[in-house]
Image: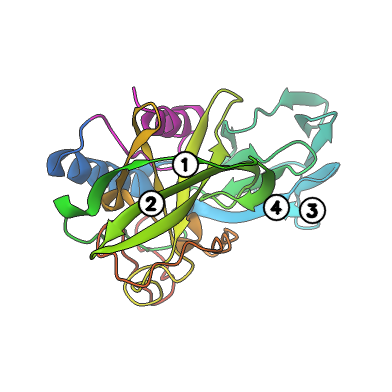
Amino acid sequence: MSAPLRFALAAAVGIAGAVWPLAAGGQSRTAVEQERREFAKWLRAAPLSPRRAVGVVPIGAALSFGPPTAAVPLSGIAAGELVEREGRLVLRSGASEQALVRGRGVALGAWHLLASGAPGHSVVTVFAAELRTGKEPSWFPYDPQAAAPVTLIPAPVPATLRLLAPDGTEVEASEAGSVSLRLEGKAETLRVRRIPGVSDEESELEIFFRDATSGRTTYPAGRFVALIPLGGDRYLLDFNRARNPFCAYNTAYPCPAPWRGNALPLAIRAGERYLGGGFEPSSRP
């Protein structure tokens, strides 16, 4: 099983869908189009779909929820609080306590909560039962020329840094290195960072890039694409699997800042598009 698939399955199962499923076993048009159908279905139906998010709130030492006067008002929910102690998260309501596992959604009445982020920087994303936005995904047609094998050149000093992951969560990422490829006959180099997954054993080699379509037919801040392992230091860079950050679907999510140096002067007409036009309320429950 590829690393991207492991990460996606952990998201779809372990965190109940914080990152959409991508990079399944095959690299064909059929495989990519199937992934796209599954993603569109997940966006509409998953309890933790970004289209259901109502807010991403820092937990701090403690965060109250429930009544209208709480930091996070949740109709129909008794007063309670989320507490972080020595890196552990606890959900308190009345006399009861429940451990809150990072990356694993928990139902609270008609609401769902998802805790994420590193200890000391924990956040909780709150999801409503109904869809909050009507944004549907859109893609460029599959392009077999948009995928190419690349070699990862390790970073001389794999420094760590805090950045926002595709789901808007602040994580401790590391500089993995860079890859080079030829686009329209010109050599281009892209910075690669290792973004942690659900557990310490899981991570993803990601590229956050902008190109000449950014702000026109794709999301202005840029798109993410994961490297697919081919063995050793070789990877597949498939722009057909380029995807938007969650903020493209719901303004409840903070949006990652573009990575310096990953701006391509040409248009990558592959992967996920962005139609713009704001976020219209969905008519579906």
Horizontally, residue 163 falls left or right of residue 283, namely right
- The x and y percentages for residue 93 are 77, 33
> Does residue 130 appear anywhere in the picture?
no
Q: CA distance from mark 1 to mark 4?
A: 37 Å
Mark 4 crowd level (few <14, some 14–19, many ≥20, 10 Å Cα): some
The numbered dot on residue 57 is 4
Q: Is residue 20 magenta?
A: yes
Q: CA distance from mark 3 to mark 1?
A: 49 Å
Marks 4 and 2: which is nearer the front?
2
Q: CA distance from mark 1 to mark 2?
A: 9 Å
Task: Mark 4 or mark 2: name the one nearer the start of the chain.
Answer: 4
- The x and y percentages for residue 134 are 38, 63
Q: Secondary structure at mark 2?
A: strand
Q: Report the residue at 37% width, 63% height from top.
A: 135
User: What amino acid does circle 2 point to?
Assistant: Ser
For the residues bearing labels 3 and 2, Cβ distance under 8 angstroms: no
Q: CA distance from mark 4 to mark 2?
A: 38 Å
Which coloring applies here?
A: rainbow
Residue holding disc 1: 153
Residue holding disc 3: 70
Q: Is residue 61 magenta?
A: no
Mark 3 crowd level (few <14, some 14–19, many ≥20, 10 Å Cα): some
Judge by depth and name the residue closer to the eye, 60 or 111: 60
Image quadrant in which the C terminus is located: bottom left
User: What amino acid does circle 1 point to?
Assistant: Ile
- The x and y percentages for residue 198 are 56, 30
Residue holding disc 2: 180
Vertically, is 195 above or below 215?
above
Task: Mark 1 or mark 2: name the one nearer the start of the chain.
Answer: 1
Q: Which residues are magenta?
A: 1-25
Horizontally, residue 277 falls left or right of residue 26, namely right
